[in-house]
Image: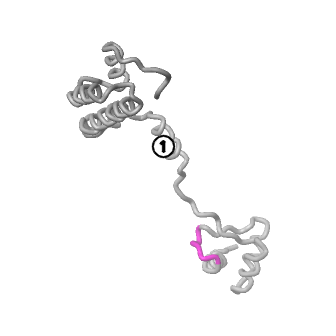
Amino acid sequence: MQITNQKRLAARLLGCGVNRVWIHPSFVDQVASAVQTDDIREFIEEGWIKAKPMKGTSRVRARARLAQKRKGRRKGQGTRAGSANARNPRKNRWMRTIRSQRRTLKELRDDETIAPSQYRRYYLKAKGGSYRSIAHMRSQMTLEGVNFQGGDE
């Protein structure tokens, strides 16, 4: 039995391609005997003829990859395009460091841990790149006799 014509009619009614038309295996004989569009429409309503779902590209692998990247994985030599400076510019590194150091110095001055004259001295040292980080700056200040009371920051 040939159901090419029936599939074509069903595809037109379902608004899909011929390859997506599914005919229930138990009712192939009845579908094959159908000639008119109304008959096909009736079979669609009864559920003997359906449109298969669209096939798409699965995003599962892409999501897994993205989750790994968020954890900091997949950053090896083979992935990199661009110099270290292009990926994390020196200027940005410097701005991050100096801004955090200056913020800390301002907090220390405002809560009167250091005097304004000391603030100026440490500010200029920070500007000159004397400190790698806030922790380094604090350790140097401790060595120079600044005592941090309580547990600020």
Left/right placement of residue 119 relative to residue 39 reads left
Q: Is residue 83 visible?
A: no
Q: Amino acid at mark 1?
A: Leu
User: Residue 99 sits in which quadrant?
Assistant: top left
Q: Is residue 79 visible?
A: yes
Most extreme residue toward the left, as rendered?
A: 128
Left/right placement of residue 62 relative to residue 10 reads left
Depth check: 65 or 5 in front? 65
Q: Is residue 18 magenta?
A: yes
Looking at the image, residue 57 lies above or below residue 42 = above
Q: Residue at x 64, y 75 (%)?
A: 7
User: Residue 115 sits in which quadrant?
Assistant: top left
Left/right placement of residue 17 relative to residue 143 reads right
Give the tally of numbered discs. 1
SS at circle 1: helix
* Screen quadrant of the N terminus: bottom right
Looking at the image, residue 72 lies above or below residue 43 = above
* Mark 1, residue position: 66
Q: Whole-percent x and y of residue 36?
A: 70, 86
Q: Whole-percent x and y of residue 54?
A: 58, 63
Q: Residue at x 20, y 28 (%)?
A: 128
Depth check: 144 or 61 in front? 144
The stretch in magenta equals 14-19
Q: Whole-percent x and y of residue 140?
A: 31, 17
Figure colour scheme: one colour
Q: Is residue 150 magenta?
A: no
Depth check: 56 or 3 in front? 56
Q: Residues within 10 Å of mark 1 (few under 14, many from 20)?
A: some
Looking at the image, residue 141 lies above or below residue 124 = above
Q: Whole-percent x and y of residue 106?
A: 35, 34
User: Residue 101 sits in which quadrant?
Assistant: top left
